[in-house]
Amino acid sequence: MTKQPGLSRMHRSVFAKLMAIMVGTAVTIPVLVLAFFFSMLRPLRDSRDFAMLRTAHDRMLVVLVILLLVVVFVAHVLIRRQLRPLRWLQEGVARLGEGDLDVEVQRRTDDELGALTEAFNRMVERVRAMVRARDQLLLDVSHELRSPLTRMKVALALCPQDEHQRRLSSNVAEMEAMVSELLELERLRHRRGLHIEQADLVGLLREMTHAFAERAPGVELGECPDRCVLAMDAEKIRTVLRNLLDNAIKYALPDSRPVRLSLEETPTHVSVTVRDDGPGIPDDALPSLFEPFFRVDRSRSKKTGGYGLGLSLCKRTMEAHGGTISVGRNAGRGTAFVITFRK
């Protein structure tokens, strides 16, 4: 016998299932209560002894309480089971919010929650396709720009050396650096170009401290062990630290304290913190801070920074090492960047 479409939809409806559970619970509890009171009528009718009546009353009360608890527990379990896909969706949304574009929630039901799961997976796929298209566009444009930039450099080399030629050469060099960083971002996405070897991270921090010592407000080395040897590309991590320190010093205030470098080592990970005493980063800028070409200064003035690839390059470098980079506010003012390596 063929099911009716309306009945089939009702059978697949999570709301119909929840309604059935609630109605069943609402009916079962009054039935148990009525059964209890009717059962009390027999001791009242047949018993001539008050003690026997009291004993029967207590026993039936215990039975009723147990039955009510069983009914409530079964209803609770059934409702949790029906709403389990919502927890799976919540976990998927949390992973997507953290930047995991490979998240996929399995569809295990044919009701409204199953349809919502399918819609979520389609949305993730569209977001993933848009991000890939954006990255591919940046990569293609970067490749196409290399040839005209090379021709411009050759033509400028043949021009007379004057102020106009120097300005053009500076602009071409800036464009070339931008193209190189875009290509580097793509190489790091696939973990190409990494030269992993054992290196002392503490020694690298000391090196960066000395390199920025002459730039106000300066850099100081905080709590660190004597050595911390990790498998990493020392040159790439040096670039990450240089970008973070350069940003911290660039945005320092006249009364800012020195930028502070520190390292914390645990059995599972190693964290390096770059803590500055600058103006901080607005809350609305934090979610997009590591995106390519994003800058806190929306005017995109050269006086307040580059072209917005430094932090995205830091993020891609740490991901290529299997680590992470995060940012937060200090207790007073300023910003703290934390790069973390997993052991």
Image (cartoon, helix red, strand yellow):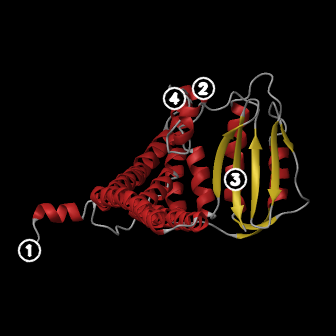
**Is 197 placed left or right of 305 in the picture?**
right
Quadrant location of residue 341?
bottom right
Residues packed near mark 1 inside 10 Å, few (<14), some (14 to 19) or many (20 plus): few
Tell me which amino acid carries mark 4. Arg
Question: Which label lies toward us, 3 or 4?
Answer: 3
User: Mark 2 sits on what residue?
Assistant: 303
Query: Residue at the spot x=15%, y=63% of the render?
Result: 7
Q: CA distance from mark 1 to mark 2?
A: 74 Å
Q: CA distance from mark 1 to mark 3?
A: 61 Å
Q: CA distance from mark 2 to mark 3?
A: 27 Å
Residues packed near mark 4 inside 10 Å, few (<14), some (14 to 19) or many (20 plus): some
* SS class, disc 1: loop
- Residue 83 appears in the figure: no
Image quadrant containing the N terminus: bottom left
Question: Which label lies toward us, 1 or 3?
Answer: 1
Question: Which label lies toward us, 1 or 2?
Answer: 1
Tell me which amino acid carries mark 3. Ile
Q: Nearer the viewer, residue 63 or 194?
A: 63
Q: Which mark is residue 2?
A: 1
Q: Is the residue under label 2 in contact with that under label 4 (CB below 8 Å)?
A: no
* SS class, disc 3: strand
User: Mark 4 sits on what residue?
Assistant: 300
Tell me which amino acid carries mark 1. Thr
Q: Is the residue under label 2 in contact with that under label 1 (CB below 8 Å)?
A: no
Query: Residue at the spot x=69%, y=27% of the render?
Result: 279
Q: CA distance from mark 4 to mark 2?
A: 9 Å
In x, y percent, where is residue 64?
A: 49, 64
Tell me which amino acid carries mark 2. Lys
Q: Is the residue under label 3 in contact with that under label 2 (CB below 8 Å)?
A: no
**Is 194 placed left or right of 197 in the picture?**
left
**Is 25 placed left or right of 177 in the picture?**
left
Q: Which mark is residue 204?
A: none
